[in-house]
Amino acid sequence: MRSARIACATLIVLAIGANAQATLRTVTVDETTLRFKPDTLVIHVGDIVQWVNPAGNVMGHTSTSGTGSADPNTGKHWDLGPFGPGTSVQHRFTGPGTYPYYCIPHELSGMKGKIVVLNAVDATGTGAKAALVALLLLVGGYAIWKRRSVPATSRS
Ligand SMILES: [Cu+2]
């Protein structure tokens, strides 16, 4: 039982450690619709978002935090670009929250997006899933231990 607990604790630590790794996530500029794709991206703290302006596009774009030019905090978190066709820009998200952003030259066309940053461990994270599996193993181990403790004479 003690070794099972230690194994589970190790699994949980490994799960949290693995989930703390930074992942590179991509948002692509679609010039046919003047939209960021996807326009809402859910990531985890520590992840890096890369905005890509594909070669073949013809315009420069920005990724600027805030809801628009009227936002008093526009550009407070990041203000990248303009980046031309065939180039990209990146920003690493270090705090949880919902971060709206937009493209300065195409604000009036509605070119905007949102990055939702979740804590490293949450209900939908792989770390949480691994921790749940570890907990189920712990519960399972306990159930097996209980069954074995039942005297043979009491079995039907
Ligand atoms: Cu743009």
Image: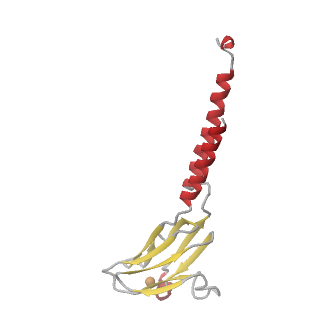
Residue drawn at x 56%, y 53% as measured from the top left: 14
Furthest-left residue in this view: 56
Residue drawn at x 40%, y 87% as measured from the top left: 60
Name the foreground residue: 144 vs 28.
144
Residue drawn at x 49%, y 73% as measured from the top left: 49
Q: Quadrant of the C terminus?
A: top right
Q: Is residue 139 left or right of residue 21?
A: right
Q: Quadrant of the N terminus?
A: top right
Measured as percent of width and height from the top left, residue 37 is found at 44, 71
- Residue 13 visible (yes or no): yes
Furthest-front residue in this view: 3
Q: Quadrant location of residue 75?
A: bottom right
Measured as percent of width and height from the top left, residue 55 is found at 32, 80
Name the foreground residue: 43 vs 72.
43
Residue drawn at x 63%, y 39% as measured from the top left: 3
Q: How many marks?
A: 0
Q: Quadrant location of residue 34?
A: bottom left
- Residue 108 visible (yes or no): no
For residue 73, above or below residue 93 = below
The quarter of the rendering in which ligand 1 is drawn is bottom left
Q: Quadrant location of residue 144?
A: top right
Name the foreground residue: 10 vs 136.
10
Q: Is residue 95 left or right of residue 53?
A: right
For residue 71, above or below residue 9 = below
Measured as percent of width and height from the top left, residue 4 is found at 62, 38
Q: Is residue 140 left or right of residue 83?
A: right
Measured as percent of width and height from the top left, residue 143 is found at 65, 30
For residue 4, above or below residue 76 = above
